[in-house]
Image (cartoon, grey):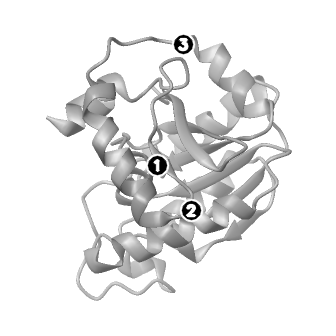
């Protein structure tokens, strides 16, 4: 039920003031507050913003985009996975490469170029990030998948929050990562190639303002 609620009701949150999570100050208290308010807020009526408003938000500062890598058939990674060897990994299909290029074109058509692009070290994320064509791509380990080791979920998500808190967000910021990472941070379950637009408030609170699907 949570995944459906996340898809249908968490996609637009700024108008509703939905609290997704907070950058740690008093971490345990922030998470407890988020968990106590989340169910009721997810049940509120949907408020859809036009896609143009989401692109405007991303250009305005204090926002960033989480992007799940483009289509890479399968799930997880095969036995013998090596992060430094793309031949051991689940990689983009031809359709996924085309999808990544089209996502980049949508950024450019909405006036977002160049952008600061950071990526998981996984090859499918790096290839997605490079095919966007929005500028140099920087590897960022806090965006790496923890699908094969869920014990890393909380500490790695906490590290990602800290890293986000330190970013200036004066220019468009795009983080190319995995479904598990995005869901852990936002409670949104994105499709391949889907963007999740997030606002960082002056207090460090992260609010999901909407999602943009590639197809």
- Upstream in the sequence, badge 2 or badge 1? 1
Percent position of residue 50, x then y: 57, 11
Q: Nearer the viewer, residue 98 or 126?
A: 126
Q: Which mark is residue 49?
A: 3
Location of the C terminus by quadrant is top left
Instruction: Give the vertical position of 168 relative to 123 (above or below).
Output: above
CA distance separating discs 3 and 2: 25 Å
Instruction: Give the vertical position of 48 relative to 13 (above or below).
Output: above
Circle count: 3
State the SS at label 1: strand
- Upstream in the sequence, badge 3 or badge 1? 1
Residue annotated with mark 1: 21
CA distance separating discs 2 and 1: 9 Å
Q: Which mark is residue 161?
A: 2
Q: Nearer the viewer, residue 53 or 44?
A: 44
Location of the N terminus by quadrant is top left
């Amino acid at each position: 039920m949570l995944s459906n609620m996340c898809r249908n009701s968490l996609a637009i949150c700024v108008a509703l003031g939905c609290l997704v999570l907070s950058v740690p100050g008093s971490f345990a208290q922030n998470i407890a507050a988020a968990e106590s308010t989340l169910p009721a807020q997810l049940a509120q009526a949907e408020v859809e913003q036009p896609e143009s408003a989401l692109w405007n938000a991303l250009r305005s500062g204090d926002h960033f985009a989480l992007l799940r890598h483009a289509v890479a058939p399968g799930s997880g990674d095969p036995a013998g996975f090596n992060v430094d060897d793309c031949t051991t990994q689940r990689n983009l299909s031809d359709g996924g490469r085309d999808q990544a290029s089209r996502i980049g074109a949508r950024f450019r058509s909405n006036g977002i170029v160049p952008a600061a692009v950071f990526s998981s070290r996984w090859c499918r994320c790096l290839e997605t990030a490079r095919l966007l064509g929005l500028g140099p791509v920087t590897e960022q380990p806090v965006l790496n998948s923890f699908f094969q080791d869920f014990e890393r979920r909380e500490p790695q998500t906490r590290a990602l929050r800290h890293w986000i808190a330190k970013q200036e967000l004066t220019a468009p910021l795009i983080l190319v990562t995995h479904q598990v990472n995005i869901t852990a941070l936002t409670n949104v379950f994105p499709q391949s190639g889907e963007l999740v637009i997030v606002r960082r408030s002056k207090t460090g609170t992260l609010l999901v303002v909407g999602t943009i699907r590639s197809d």
